[in-house]
Amino acid sequence: MIDQILRKVKEKFKNYPKRLNHTLNVYHLALSIAKVHGIDEEKVAIASLWHDYAKHDDIEIIEQHCSSYIKSKYQKLPFVLHGYAAANILKKEFEIKDFAILQAISSHVIGVLNMTCVGKVLFISDFCAEDKAKSQEKDEIIKLAYESLNVAYKKALVLKSRLFKKTAQDFSLIKELIKVMEDFKVNDLAVYDFLGTNAFYDYFIICSVNPRTAKAISNYIHVNFKEFLKHVENSPGWVLIDCNDVIIHLFSKENREFYNLDQRLSNTKKIK
């Protein structure tokens, strides 16, 4: 079954090499930790390979695999839903009903207090995988994971809760900025999601506008989002607005085609 799941995951992420690399890093780290503690390696392997299976699906598809309760619970935090969707897809396609596996996948984004050992291993491994931004705290969590899984899990929960609050704030910001773009009736609006894959920014907003609209949007953001605004760079046909973790690119139609940024980001998750 592991080979089947691995083939399925590789096929799913054939256009997302970074996601596949992350998945394999999580898989190897999780198995390494599981072996030390005598935790069921097959369950850990399945959970770690499958945990992000729905990560790049459109939110409409993800929601189809989530219960009404879960959708309501995480209405303001939809980036949590891909774990629940992945668990339900696994249950349906492979008829896996093991609680530890399904809970690990469902809860790998934010964790739960009553997490099984399989879930704790996945949560720690996903949070500390090599492809993500390294830190001394994450290195300490990995070291702890080989000594005391419970202590490492609690520490990872605390550290991720801080980042989770920031992520929630960022998601609220991106929704507000998208609405601004829609209110200004920009053309060909595109929003790219870099969460967890880039240390410098979380989202790109790209759209096509005329010079008058670009100036109006820039002025509006300067007045209404000044607590987030870090920098504005004006050049002919391209205004770049840095709102902390959200980068806005206001292109003329000609410059957007010339720089072809959308094509360069074709392997990046697009949320709009």
Image (cartoon, rainbow, N blue to C red):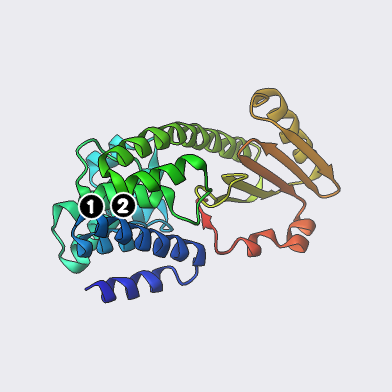
- Name the residue: 66% across, 37% down: 184
Q: Mark 2 points at which residue?
A: 122
- Name the residue: 55% across, 33% down: 173
Name the residue type under label 2: Leu
Question: How far across and how far down the image is residue 24, in percent?
Answer: 40, 65
Asked if the residue at tag 1 contacts the one at tag 2, i.e. Cβ–Cβ closer than 8 Å, the answer is: yes
Residue most toward the front?
Answer: 147
Question: How far across and how far down the image is residue 249, in percent?
Answer: 70, 47
Question: Are there few (<14), some (14-19), or many (20+) residues within 10 Å of tag 1?
Answer: many
Question: How far across and how far down the image is residue 110, in percent?
Answer: 34, 40
Kindly identify which numbered label has been placed on residue 118: 1
Q: Is 254 placed left or right of 78 in the picture? A: right
- Name the residue: 64% across, 29% down: 228
Callout 1: helix, strand or loop?
helix
Callout 2: helix, strand or loop?
helix
Do we see residue 106 in this rendering?
no
